[in-house]
Image (cartoon, rainbow, N blue to C red):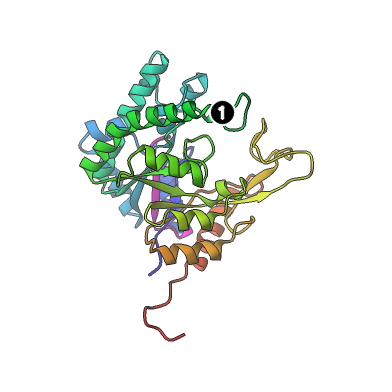
Amino acid sequence: MPRQVLLFTGPWADVPLDVLAAKAAGWGYSGFELCCWGDHLEVQRGLSDDDYGPARLDLLTRHDLQVPVVANHKVGQAVCDPIDRRHQALVPEYVWGDGDPAGVQQRAAEEMTATFRLAERLGAGVVSGFTGSPIWGYVAGYPAPRAADIADAMKQFAKQWHPILDVARECGVRFACEVHPGQLAFDLYSAELVLEAIDHREEFGFTFDPSHMHWQGVDPVEFLRRFPDRIYHVHVKDAQLALNGRAGVLAGYWPSGDPRAGWQFRSPGHGGIDWPGIIRTLNAIGYDGALSVDWHDPGMDREYGAVDACRFVRAIDFDPPQRGAKR
């Protein structure tokens, strides 16, 4: 049976939700991975105003759209990160407060617990997002971290996220941590460390986005094979290496689309990712969740790209063979 094809609304946060809902329905999407920024979903309003959540659901239902996943990447980033002025643009004003780093982290953690409570009210089974990392600056730099630094960072992560995951368990909602540069879990081996640090809690799994693995040289299929029971959500976004002998795979100082970068995001099917191999492996591990288009392509009109991406995902999402079928 075909999986739901969602549109991750984060890249569309500048478009009011009512406008985006009408467009997405016309483009062929079956629902949203609804982000908690822009006007798409306001966490505190959703908990304090009993009419807000039902009104949001009613708006989407009128367009035959569902919300199986709620996303709060920006606030999640502030839970474990060393806080600096960049985070003020990520989090709501009430989370930033006076900007004191410890206070921002604590309020970010409280906002994440509130996100799980709101997701439960909306009937969403997954919250996707980031965890942040106290040691990302150590990954590709000098001086290199000591083993004790890594161990301390994992302990800090567990201390900050266990209470959030307690609420996730209470709400019956799972957390899908996006494996992504800038996070504690950014490749296969670091994902193993993070799972171990969090005691392999059932509430904690991964958002699998092959675009972020592809440019690092990580085989997305190997990641799926290593964590078959921890893939709680899937992003569909492509990437293309653009190495010309002058740049490496690190993002560098350049914005998306800058020709000095060694790789670029691409609309699904327009990059270098082996999508049939990924679908085969998702079928093999029994993943039956949504496929969520996280659209990003600096060289393509985004409305054209959204339509093209939806068609592409539906075309490649083939069923596995029936059990017992003759070969």
Sort mark 1 into few (<14), some (14-19) or many (20+) by Cα contacts within 10 Å: some
Residue at the image position 45 percent from the left and 60 percent from the top? 28
Give the percent coordinates (x, y) of residue 264.
65, 45
Give the percent coordinates (x, y) of residue 24.
45, 53
- Front position in the image: 91 or 327: 327
> Residue 29: within the magenta?
yes
Query: Magenta stretch?
Result: 27-38
The answer to whether residue 19 is seen in the rendering is: yes
Give the percent coordinates (x, y) of residue 131.
42, 34
Placement of 308 over or under 215, stated as above or below: below
Helix, strand or loop at mark 1: helix
Amino acid carrying label 1: it is: Tyr
The answer to whether residue 121 is seen in the rendering is: no
Placement of 269 over or under 169, stated as above or below: below
- Front position in the image: 1 or 101: 101
Residue at the image position 28 percent from the left and 45 percent from the top? 173
Placement of 163 over or under 265, stated as above or below: above
Count every numbered label the image shows and give the total: 1
Specify the quadrant that holds the N terminus: bottom left
Residue at the image position 58 percent from the left and 50 percent from the top? 218
Q: Residue furthest right?
A: 245
**Residue 5 relative to residue 139: left or right:** left
Give the percent coordinates (x, y) of residue 184.
47, 35
Residue at the image position 42 percent from the left and 17 percent from the top? 101
Quadrant of the rendered image containing residue 326: bottom left
Residue designated by label 1: 138
- Front position in the image: 198 or 206: 198
> Residue 101: within the magenta?
no
- Front position in the image: 228 or 58: 228
Q: Residue furthest front?
A: 147
**Residue 269 relative to residue 202: left or right:** right
Quadrant of the rendered image containing residue 201: top left
